[in-house]
Amino acid sequence: MKYAITMVTGKFGKAAINYLMNLVDHKDIIALARNVDKAKKELPEDIKVRPGDYTNKDQLVESLKDVDKLLFISSQPGGEVSRLQQHKNVVNAAKKADVKYIAYTSFPHADKADNFLSKDHTATELYIKEMGIDRSFLRNNWYLENELATLKAANNGGTFVYAAGNGKVGWALEKEYAESAVKVLTMDKPKEIYEFAGQSRSYAELSNALKKVAANDFVVKEVSLDEYEEGMQKADLPAAVAKVVTDIQALIKDGELQENTNDLPDVLGHPLTSIEDALREALQ
């Protein structure tokens, strides 16, 4: 059985391939990376590295030859080639290369979600289904590391600012999502859908947990969405980025990331890192 993981030089891919190397024989692993030289430097010599540029269709077909199971990590939006087109390139290449199974990192409730973050994931899930490839959709909630700017500001004695009201999020460490992805990839009979998330918490609850571990005292401030966006721009974030970050707060406020599921600890086979320990780790 040959396993491949895409985007192995990114944070998620790096964590995932490290977990996979502990589970299966190195000769059965293929690492895909846009920057092959970088991946070769970072990985042991006995791991095969192949080019994995989502915009290069022919190269992807070649790189996915002999692969039985693929962990397909979704790309970032905003490239010259649209994210959805990049994803279709990967799926088409997997089909041509006769990949038997894809585990795809998706968005919470991608079959029902309707927001600016979910659209590409919804379409990618549908496309994988249409191609008739056996699959699991790993619908990852939110990485705790996504909040690093807020957490670091508060830890340094600044202000913990949020605009998401009582909206709740299923925060967990990115490495826990990566480990669960590899566990699913190597299962004999995985489910089609996993809603991966930590325990749902509000920003107020997150700030209370942070107060237990922070190096300094800090003030918690809930603001309106307009004030939040203005504050982001004042902090020298480009206007487009400030808008996206604010739109995420609005999405959370609307309950789009509230989740009630045990899929993540069930697949990991152990409880998730406690929120206090996870905060300590994220801040390091």
Image: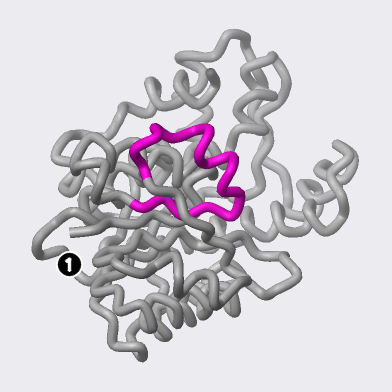
Scheme of image coloration? one colour
Where is residue 127? Give x, y as percent. Answer: 42, 85
Q: Report whether 217 appears left or right of 225.
A: left
* Residue 132 is a magenta residue: no
**Bounds of the magenta segment:** 30-47
Task: Kindly state the secondary structure of the residue where label 1 is placed.
Answer: loop
- Name the residue at the top extreme: 215
**Lateral position of residue 203 relative to residue 173, left or right:** right
**Residue under numbered circle 1:** 191
Task: Name the foreground residue: 178 vs 64.
Answer: 64
* 228 over 154 or under it: above or below: below
Residue 210 to residue 13: above or below: above
Residue 42 part of the magenta segment: yes
Query: Which sits in the foreground, 82 or 150?
Result: 82
Going 28% across and 81% down the picture, which residue do you hit? Answer: 133
**Quarter of the view holding residue 152:** top right
Q: In this view, does 85 lie to the left or right of 91?
A: right
